[in-house]
Image (cartoon, helix red, strand yellow):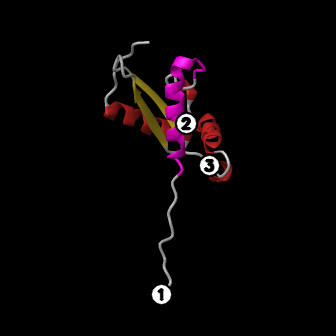
Amino acid sequence: MATEKLTKEEIEAKAESLSKIYGVAVRPLIFVEEETNEQIVGFVKDPSRLVKIRVLDKALTSQMTAASELLDLVIIPEESDPRIMSEKPENDKYYLGAVMASMNVIKFSIDTYKKK
C-alpha cells in the first residue's frame, strides 16, 4: 500500500478541511512504518462532552477499553488509512497506537486554586 508521503502542512490542511466539514476540531494521527518509512495517517474528531464524560468514567476501571471505544467513535474511517482499524494482527501496532492517542484528545484543566 505504497502512497506518496504527505508533508506536515498537507496533513494539517486536510485536518482543517475536515474540521469545517464535520463542524468540530479534527486532529491527525501520523504513524511511520519502521521498515519502509511509509506514513500511516488517520484523522479523529473531537468527541462531544457527553462522550468525554462516559469515556473518563469508564477509564476509571478499564482505561484501554475506554480508549478503544473512544477511537471507534472519533475516527473518520473514510479519511484514514484502513490499516489503523484493520483487525489483521500485523496492523495491531497502528490500532493500539491510535487507541493510546485517542485518550490524548480529552484535555481538561486542573484547578490550581489554593486556599491560604
Question: Mark 3 or mark 1: which comes first in sequence?
Answer: 3
User: Where is residue 77 drawn, in percent x and y?
Assistant: 57, 27
Q: Distance between the residues labelled 3 and 1?
A: 36 Å
C-alpha separation, residue under disc 3 versus residue under disc 2: 17 Å
Q: Which amino acid lies under the numbered mark 1 shown in the image of this protein?
A: Lys
* Residue 35 position within the rendered picture, expressed as x and y whole percent measured from the top left: 36, 18
For numbered disc 2, what is the local secondary structure? helix
Q: Residue 98, relative to residue 47: is it above or below? A: above
Q: In which quarter of the image is residue 37?
A: top left
Disc ID at residue 97: none
Residue under the image location 39 percent in, 16 percent down: 3
Mark 1 Cα-neighbour bin, 10 Å: few <14, some 14–19, many ≥20: few
Q: Residue at x 45, y 34 (%)?
A: 29
| Residue 87 magenta-highlighted | yes
**Label 1, on which residue?**
116
Instruction: Report the residue marked by disc 3.
Output: 48
Residue 22 covered by magenta stretch = no
Residue 102 percent location from the top left of the image: 53, 41
Q: Which residue is drawn at 49% across and 76% down?
A: 113
Q: Which amino acid does label 3 sit on?
A: Ser
The residue carrying pointer 2 sits among few (fewer than 14), some (14 to 19) or many (20 or more) residues within 10 Å by Cα, namely many
The local secondary structure at tag 3 comes to loop
The residue identified by callout 2 is: 99
* Front residue of 13 and 7: 7
Stretch in magenta = 86-106
| Magenta stretch: dominant secondary structure | helix
